[in-house]
Each structure stands twice: as C-alpha cells, then as structure tokens.
Amino acid sequence: YPGTYGALTPAANDPMWGYFTAIAGQDGEVDAMELQRCLTQSGFTGTYSPFSLETCRIMIAMLDRDFTGKMGFSEFKELFVALNGWKQNFTMFDRDRSGTVEHHELTQAISSMGYRISPQALNAIIKRYNKGGRIYFDDYVACCVKLRALTDHFKRRDTMHQGSVHFGYDDFILCTMAI
Amino acid sequence: YPGTYGALTPAANDPMWGYFTAIAGQDGEVDAMELQRCLTQSGFTGTYSPFSLETCRIMIAMLDRDFTGKMGFSEFKELFVALNGWKQNFTMFDRDRSGTVEHHELTQAISSMGYRISPQALNAIIKRYNKGGRIYFDDYVACCVKLRALTDHFKRRDTMHQGSVHFGYDDFILCTMAI
Ligand SMILES: [Ca+2]
Ligand SMILES: [Ca+2]
Ligand SMILES: [Ca+2]
C-alpha cells in the first residue's frame, strides 16, 4: 500500500508535478532553454510571439534566489502565477489587440500593478523596451520581471520603509547584474 | 569657398562622420536596429555570431544619457572605442578560440578591466550570462555594457568614494531599468 515505497511528497500530489518533471528532465530543475520550450509548446503566449531566450533567462533570474540559474517546482509554479497576471494585464491594456502596448497603455499597466514611478523613470523604461514605439508582449514580460525583482531587492533592504536604501558596491552589482 | 555654406562642424572633418550619417539615416541618430545592421555588415564580430537586438539596445542605453533611445555621433564613436576594447579582451581570454569564455576566464577578464567583485556576485553574473556553461561574445558584451553602466551610476552617486551609496526608489529604478 502507499507508504511502503516511501512517503509521498506534497509535490507529487500536485496536478502540475508531472508536467514539471517532464519539462525539468533528469536534473529535476528547469533552465532557460527548457522554460522557453515549455512556454512555446504550451501555447502560453497565444497569438503573441513566443518568448525570447533572453526573457526566459530573466524570468528564472527573478526567482533564482540561490543563483543556480535553474528553477525548482515551487519557483515554477510561482512563475506561472506571475505570468498569468502579466498576460491578463497586457491583454486588458492592449485594447486594439495589436499585440503591443503603447506609451500611455504601459503607464496605465504599470500603475495598475501598484508601482509608483516618476514620468522620467517611466520614459526611460519605455525607451528601453519599445520597438518602433510599441512594446511587444515578450518585452513587456521582461520589463515586468525586472521591475518586480528590482523592487523586491529594494524593499528587502528598505526595512524602515523610508523609500531610501543604502547599497554597498558589491551588493548593488549582485542585485542588478543578475537580472 | 568653404565657409560660405556655413561653418564646417568638427564632426564633418572626422573620417567616421560619413559612415555615421549613412547608418543614422534621416533622423541623424542611430537606434538599436540601425546599430545591429551596421555591426553585422561591418563584420565587427568576425567569426563570432552577430549581436542580438537585445545587446544592441543595452549598448545604446549605456550611452543614452538623455533617454532618447538613440545615439548621436559622439556616443557612436565612444561605443566603438568600448567595443574594440571588449573584443580584444574577449579574444585574449578565449585562449582556445572556441568563441566562448568559461567561468574562470570571465573572472580573469572582469578583474583585468579593474572591477573588484566578490566571488558571489561573479557567480551570479556567470549564471545570468552563460549558455550551457559558456559565455558567448554577444552575452559577454551585454555583460560588460551593464557592468560599466551600473558602475558608472554607482560612482556618480558615491561622491565621497566610500563604496556605499544612498538610493531613493525612483532613482534606483531609473538607473537599473534603463539598462
Ligand atoms: Ca495595442
Ligand atoms: Ca536613425
Ligand atoms: Ca574558450
């Protein structure tokens, strides 16, 4: 009977577990190429173009707290929750279904996620992520991933909630280069 | 005679000026797609694979102090100086001419550029930029661009040279999201 062959882990009861192990392969973790294949095959991006390897790498970096460059099961699930949120958000603000959001749409999308960012910083973000004035879904997700990871790093250090943080050089490089 | 049609700008005497204007086109500035085309056609990467659009975007972001997403002539020349340095550096550390550098080679390359980075931060950087354990020239340049831009941002704020900086949230996001 069950139990004889070792206790079932909670993960094994999870409907996503089988899916995860199939993608992860032998090493039991998902790297950027495996993630890209999985998101392409699952049709996650729908009518939008598939994710670039670059975006897959920063998705993993966002959750990769131990810097292995790979994702375990709990991170994998966490990523899907975040991705679903960003996809909903993108679809909502891409009103004409062009597959892109424009300047004012991105401004709305970012503020709807609760970020408070100055027009100057928003402008810099748009300049960085647009192609011909439009922001595609792939770049939108890359932008959301970075914004979330950087904000998390900042908040974790802003223990007094003063909106201001002290960074040593090495810590600054560690936080910002990994993303 | 010269002068009748307006004073010659110093740029017009520069041997690179004609090349720049041909690439820049009507708007007189070089964007990421124009830069990618130019670096591919010029054969800059040689036997290495051409630069991704992503790397071209962050090359521009590094020098784009007014956040227009484009490069003028002086930035264009500055970029070529930096690129030549990185290419030399890469070729020097890629001893077996595999077109990639590995963990210890990147460590040497980065310290040869004068950066002092802890093993933990270096490890995070390698995890972020490697593909299958190897770092390709395209990603190497992306890494160098980011490291330089982030270090510049840090230094500009570290006026007392204490190796420690105060960041407000918006300033932190502006510095780090644009790259
Ligand atoms: Ca749209
Ligand atoms: Ca142009
Ligand atoms: Ca090599």
Image (cartoon, coloured by chain):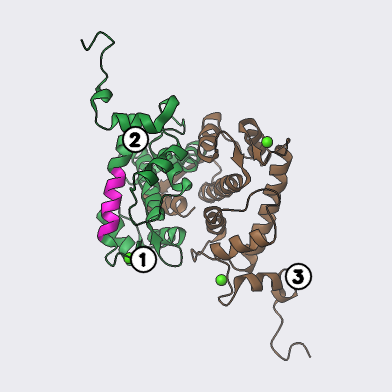
Chain colours: A green, B brown
Task: Give the mark nearest the N terminus, 2 or 1.
Answer: 2
Quadrant in which the N terminus of chain A is drawn: top left
Q: Are marks 2 and 3 on the same chain?
A: no
Q: Hey, what amino acid is under mark 2? A: Phe
Instruction: Find the distance from the CA under tag 1 to the CA under tag 3.
Output: 38 Å
**Residue beneath disc 1:** A103
Residue B31: percent from left, percent from top: 55, 65
The stretch of residues the image draws in magenta is: A82-92
Residue B32: percent from left, percent from top: 54, 62
Q: Are marks 2 and 1 on the same chain?
A: yes
B12 or B135, which is in the foreground? B135
**Residue beneath disc 3:** B15
B25 or A169, which is in the foreground? B25
A34 to B151, vertically: above or below: above
Does residue B118 appear left or right of residue A90 in this picture?
right
Disc 1: which chain?
A
Per the image, label 3 sits on a secondary structure element best described as loop
Per the image, label 2 sits on a secondary structure element best described as helix
Instruction: Find the distance from the CA under tag 2 to the CA under tag 3.
Output: 53 Å
Per the image, label 1 sits on a secondary structure element best described as helix
Q: Hey, what amino acid is under mark 3? A: Pro
State which mark lies toward you, 2 or 1: 2
**Residue A2's mark?**
none
Does residue A101 appear left or right of residue B39 in this picture?
left
Does residue A14 appear left or right of residue B151 in this picture?
left
Please identify the residue farthest to the left as the structure is shown. A1
Q: Hey, what amino acid is under mark 1? A: His
